[in-house]
Amino acid sequence: MPMQYDAIIIGGGHNGLVTAFYLARAGLKVHVCEARDVVGGACVTEEFAPGFRNSTASYTVSLLQDKVACDMNLAEHGLKIVNRPLNNFLPLERDYLKVGPGVTEREVARFSKKDAAALPAYDARLEVLADQLRRLALKTPPGRGLKGMAAMAAQGWPLLGLSGPEQRDLFNLFTRSAREFLDGWFESDPIKAVLGFDSIVGHFASPDTPGSAYVLLHHVFGQVNGIKGAWGHAIGGMGSITQAMARACEEKGVSIGLEEPVAYVNVGGGTARGVTLADGRVLDAPIIASNVGPALLFGQLIDRSDLPDDFARAIDGYACGSGTFRMNVALSELPEFSVLKEPGHHHGAGIIIAPSLDYMDRAYTGAKAYGWSARPIVEMLIPSTLDDTLAPPGSHVASLFCQQFAPRLPDGQSWDDVREKVADLIVDTVTAHAPNFKRSIIARQIHSPLDLERKFGLIGGDIFHGRISLDQLWAARPVLGHGDHRMPIKGLYLCGSGAHPGGGVTGAPGHNAAREILADRPLFKLRA
């Protein structure tokens, strides 16, 4: 006899846990199916060498919704987040740029007094526009019919309150390239590099690609400990977020099954009936919420014949592949940067190795042609400078978050054949700025785009479950007409990063999906 639940969540990542929590809090009997042997999806902390632990995939905190953290009492369940001492550090050939509270204008003035003078207006403008994203993050995008039209009007109406210049900049952010947008404000390469880096994070595109300016905005609408636009570190690594979420779920009666990969979603008569696990077990429920991405859900877990033809064609065109290569390294000592050797706040910042927008553009064109660039883009974080639980005394761990690596290699190559070679290139890229880096490496953990797909179910290694572009945002995420989390099979919902407002450790898609599921509750025969 199949196990009976009110709701089954496919995938125990952070958004799946958020959905499970809200449904269980409302009285539903909820079960989470997690394919791996640890809960948390791509938001986990793992030991990758004896005594060295780090956030395996997702690696930094900013976008986590305060409402979600408060509702789930994550602090009471052990979550502690500390702010970075600096936001970013950009090492250059003979100089550097620091970006963070109280230092940015002074630092930028060394390169351009005009740019330093423009920063307050730029920050204020971006903050106004980021507030629009914050306002929409916990709202359900409009669906179809009269209800959808009413939601569209209600959510769009506040935009009319923006001034003319603010409306123009918002339009430009959605349509123009990051370079075009930043060129309208600044003249010096270093500040444009630091700000423009956000436009290509998880986005396999050039900063010259139209629409890349929005990705820049997507990364700045978060906050940490009440400070808007700040970045932070979860003590114990990112897994401490999902471990706290799991405890909150279990407190509400959620059952979490580990090593329970879902083979397919059972559908009958256009209605979701439950899931069949890879080991053959069947779990029944009238509500299925998928925390896996649309490409995985509709490409592998659902029979195409169960989908309407128009939806199937639309989802065929859903773009995945964020061009990310991820590494963790165990270090015997801190990197000594040629331009700033002594230990300092810069070691606790996001260290960006990409000195200009031109460098980023060349990295993309190189990756598009050959699979990766000879001069890759690397962001390095050293979380052990803020968290002594991650490494033995005197040692450190570093996260290397690398951009512009083709999800699929040309000429039939496999990432399995070149991953070590590419990892060496990344290490050499960092060592060019910190000469002691290579010799200080004790161990390393490598995740190519293919590794990210196999280990975490991220198709094409896409950390966002799908491209962050105008055609795949808001009411069109994953496809137009299904932005309200309701998929074309009755009882099937999307609760992960492939739904609005997109990727990052936000909890917003899970929160919003749970609200819509509970709104539809009278449509289902539930155990409760």
Image: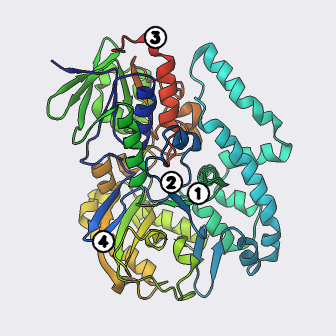
Q: Residue furthest right?
A: 164
Relative horizontal placement of residue 19, taking residue 130 as reference (left or right): left
Looking at the picture, tell me which residue is in the foreground, 74 or 515.
Answer: 74
Relative horizontal placement of residue 514, taking residue 286 as reference (left or right): right
Q: Which of the two discs, 2 and 4, labels the residue nearer the N terminus? A: 2
Residue type (three-letter) at the residue carrying disc 2: His
Residue type (three-letter) at the residue carrying disc 3: Pro
Query: Which residue bears the numbered disc 2?
Result: 203
Q: In the rendered view, tell whether residue 175 sits above or below residue 24.
A: below
Q: Position of residue 297 (x, y in %)?
A: 34, 34
Q: Marks 1 and 4, Cα distance to the nearest angstrom?
A: 27 Å
Query: Which residue bears the numbered disc 4?
Result: 444
Q: Which circle, 3 or 1, is nearer the viewer?
A: 3
Q: Position of residue 310 (x, y in %)?
A: 44, 22
Q: Position of residue 261 (x, y in %)?
A: 23, 38
Residue type (three-letter) at the residue carrying disc 1: Ser
- Do residues under tags 3 and 1 come within 8 Å of each other at their CB atoms? no
